[in-house]
Amino acid sequence: DAGITQSPRYKITETGRQVTLMCHQTWSHSYMFWYRQDLGHGLRLIYYSAAADITDKGEVPDGYVVSRSKTENFPLTLESATRSQTSVYFCASSGKLAAAYNEQFFGPGTRLTVL
Amino acid sequence: AQSVTQPDIHITVSEGASLELRCNYSYGATPYLFWYVQSPGQGLQLLLKYFSGDTLVQGIKGFEAEFKRSQSSFNLRKPSVHWSDAAEYFCAVGTGGGNKLTFGTGTQLKVEL
């Protein structure tokens, strides 16, 4: 199916474990973003990528790692999960033209619980 | 750096009543402005956007928003709310160049039947 998908949709893990959240888009968009959503904070940018092999930190990058070897995929890894990383994670993408105006298209989200 | 303020955390309106959700931004130049809606357990859906031109923009689901430069505001309005409009609404601002969106903290809308 066309669009932007995230997997898994729900994940429960334990403190200290490594977790990878997947994001896949079929539009060949250049830009991809990872946000986390927490009550009282809205959405905050974790990392973003302007193209394959180009990534940059956002507002709250600590504890997260990203990679982008292919244009369509942008996985987010929590190297050693902590309870403070319990959140809903959204992936977004944007084509070059839309990116000029910051128009982003969001995936359905992954709800992560760290016990 | 840009910032967005949504002063109302929760709003309750009766079905059929009018709605206005407030959004104020801080940015030196004209920003790109967005309203998103998030239904429970769902992702973010774009309601409307402002890039330039006419300051009153129309969106989906009967929503509109007005950009007021003098007040640094981009308030969302709907003349008659439906029960299905109950959701969380986020205002966001962008500064172009593929950079991030800055989101407000959201307004939770409850609709009373």
Image (cartoon, grey):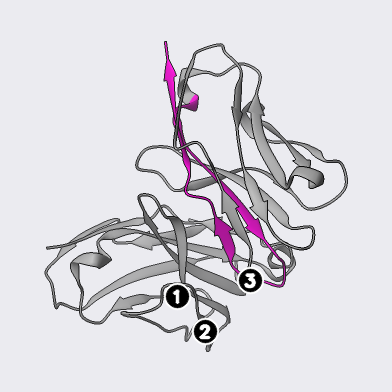
- Which mark is in front, 3 or 2? 3
Residue B83 is covered by the magenta coloring: no
The part of the image, by quadrant, that contains residue A109 is: bottom left
Circle on res. B99: 3
Residue at the (62%, 75%) spot, across then down:
A30
Q: Are marks 3 and 2 on the same chain?
A: no
Q: Is residue B50 left or right of residue A110?
A: right
Q: Which residue is mark 1?
A: A74
Give percent across and percent down for residue B10: 43, 32
Query: Which quadrant does the C terminus of chain B fall into?
Result: top left
Query: Which quadrant does the N terminus of chain B fall into?
Result: bottom right
* Magenta residue span: B85-113
Regarding mark 1 in the picture, which secondary structure is present there?
A: loop
Tell me the kind of residue under disc 1.
Phe
Q: Residues within 10 Å of mark 2 (few under 14, many from 20)?
A: some
Give percent across and percent down for residue B6: 54, 43
Give percent across and percent down for residue A90: 42, 60
Residue at the (47%, 86%) spot, across then down:
A69
Residue at the (52%, 83%) spot, across then down:
A56
Disc 1 is attached to a residue of which chain? A
| CA distance for labels 1 and 2 | 10 Å
Is B10 or A82 nearer to us in this picture?
A: B10
Tell me the kind of residue under disc 2.
Thr
Q: Which residue is mark 2?
A: A55
Q: Residues within 10 Å of mark 1 (few under 14, many from 20)?
A: many
Name the outermost residue toward the bottom: A53
Q: Residues within 10 Å of mark 3 (few under 14, many from 20)?
A: some
